[in-house]
Structure formats: C-alpha cells, structure tokens
Amino acid sequence: MRKLVVAISMLAFAGSAAFADPILDRQALMKERGKIVGGLSKVVKGEESFDAAAVLTALQALQANAEKFDADVLFPAGSDTGDTTAAPKIWQDMAGFKATEDKYLADVKAAVAAAPADVDSLKAQIGVIGSDCGTCHKGYRVKKG
C-alpha cells in the first residue's frame, strides 16, 4: 500500500510539472529576484541600515533564486507568446541568453563567497549584479508600454 501511495504521488507530481506554465513560472522567479535585489538596493541607498548577517542572507537567497533558473524549462519553444516580456532574441540566441544568466549566477556566487563587510563592498557587488541584470533586460526583454 505504501509503495502504491508513493507511486501515485510521484505520478501526480510529474503530471503537475508537465502542465506547469513556463511564463508564470519565470515571472514568479523574476519577481522574487527583483524583491531580493530591491531589498539590497535599499541598503546600498542608505534607506536601510547595513547588517552584515541580513545582507549575507539576502545574497544567499539571491543565489538560491539564480540556481533555480533553467532556460530550457522556463523558456521552452512556444512560450514566446502571451503575457510575456521575453524578447524573441531569447529563442534566436539561446546560447547567448544562457551565457548571460551563467555570468549572473557566477557573480552572485562570488558576492556570497566574499560576504560584504560594509556598505561600500555591497555597493560594488550590487553594481556588478545590477549590470548583469541590465545586460539581460536590454538584450532579452521587451519593455512594457
């Protein structure tokens, strides 16, 4: 009986994953990413005080978010239409798109590894990470409105 329950649960999970909406999934991932970076930006701008432990926790959350990014799953063929700001260039230059995300992940990992001890070091790290975000948004995202 236990094996049957486990097997049914696995099939239900596999079935739900097969019907996941890649547009909604990638939007949720990016909203989470934006929220984390937004919190770090408040520290950089002096709107919130620098707390090394809280900053490291946020950077670790950013790394976990970046590690969830899988271009093949989030941007499959056919997910270029609908309520999306993903630019056609993603599917025309998937290798470049993946390389951009790989650089972002590497830079986030470097920020975690070199946990900032003060706001100035965080500013430098956010500058690099923000540049990665800008590169992707300029090349692989269509502006709304």
Image (spheres, grey):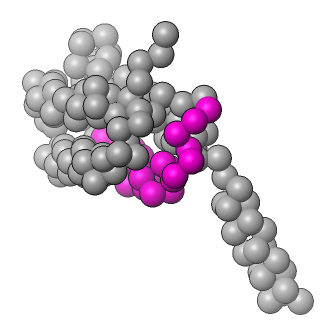
**Does the magenta-highlighted stretch encompass residue 53?**
no
Stretch of the chain drawn in magenta: 59-82
Residue 85 in the image: state x and y as whole percent. 48, 28
Closest to the observer, 45 or 65: 65
Residue at the image point whose x is 23% and y is 31% from the top: 135
Residue 45 falls in image quadrant:
top left
In percent of width and height, residue 133 lies at 28, 32
Q: Is residue 83 left or right of residue 67?
A: right
From the viewer's perspective, tell me whether residue 33 is left or right of residue 124.
right
Residue at the spot 15% in from the left edge and 33% down from the top edge? 128
Q: Is residue 112 visible?
A: no
- What residue is rendered at 19% in x and 29% in y? 131
Question: Is residue 3 visible to the viewer in this orientation of the structure?
Answer: yes
Q: Quadrant of residue 70?
A: bottom left
Horizontally, residue 116 falls left or right of residue 94, namely left
Q: Is residue 78 magenta?
A: yes
Q: Up-down: is 59 above or below 46?
A: below
